[in-house]
């Protein structure tokens, strides 16, 4: 029970810390922050691949690992597409007005 309370405390603390950090980020830094979070999701894919590839694990662990690979991949690809679109807004248009 003590370990559960410690994990719950850590989770709640991470929620508050994350909210405070994100709310203080200026708008000009959102794109680099998003690219950094995509890199972290790439690390998540590696962990999910390890979980999904464990042959001695029960089927539930393999199924959850496979789902984690799919969701983390969607997160990374979507994040990079959004980041690319946001960066394209700052590029000058060719052939248009000067």
Image: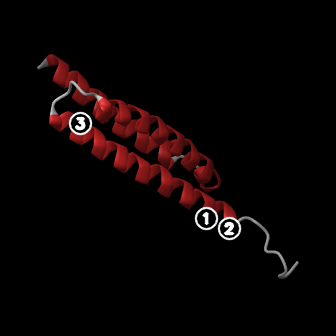
Task: Tell me if 2 is positioned left or right of 52 in this view.
Answer: left
Residue furthest to the bottom: 96
Q: How is the image coloured?
A: secondary structure
Alpha carbon separation for disc pair 2 and 1? 7 Å
Tell me whether circle 2 and circle 1 mark residues in contact (CB < 8 Å): yes
53 to 29, vertically: above or below: above
Residue 42 appears at what percent x and percent y? 48, 40
Q: Name the N-terminal-most of marks 3 and 2.
A: 3
Mark 3 — residue? 62
Front position among marks 1 and 3: 3
Residue 60 appears at what percent x and percent y? 16, 37
Residue furthest to the left: 1
- Which disc is residue 85 wearing? 1
Judged from the image, the secondary structure of the residue bearing numbered disc 2 is: loop
Residue located at (79% from left, 69% from top): 92
Pick the quarter of the image with the N terminus.
Answer: top left
* Residue density around tag 1, few if under 14, some if 14–19, many if 20 or more, within 10 Å: few
Residue located at (79% from left, 74% from top): 93
Task: Tell me if 74 is positioned left or right of 55 in this view.
Answer: right
Which residue occupies the foreground of this view, 61 or 78?
A: 61
Which residue occupies the foreground of this view, 46 or 1?
A: 46
Mark 2 — residue? 89
């Amino acid at each position: 029970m003590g370990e559960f309370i410690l994990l719950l405390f850590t989770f709640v603390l991470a929620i508050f810390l994350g909210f405070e950090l994100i709310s203080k980020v200026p708008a000009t830094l959102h794109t680099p922050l998003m690219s950094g979070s995509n890199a972290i999701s790439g690390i998540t894919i590696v962990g999910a691949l390890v979980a999904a590839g464990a042959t001695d694990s029960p089927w539930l662990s393999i199924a959850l690992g496979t789902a984690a690979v799919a969701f983390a991949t969607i997160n990374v690809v979507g994040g990079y597409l959004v980041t690319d679109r946001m960066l394209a807004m700052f590029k000058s248009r060719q052939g248009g007005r000067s």
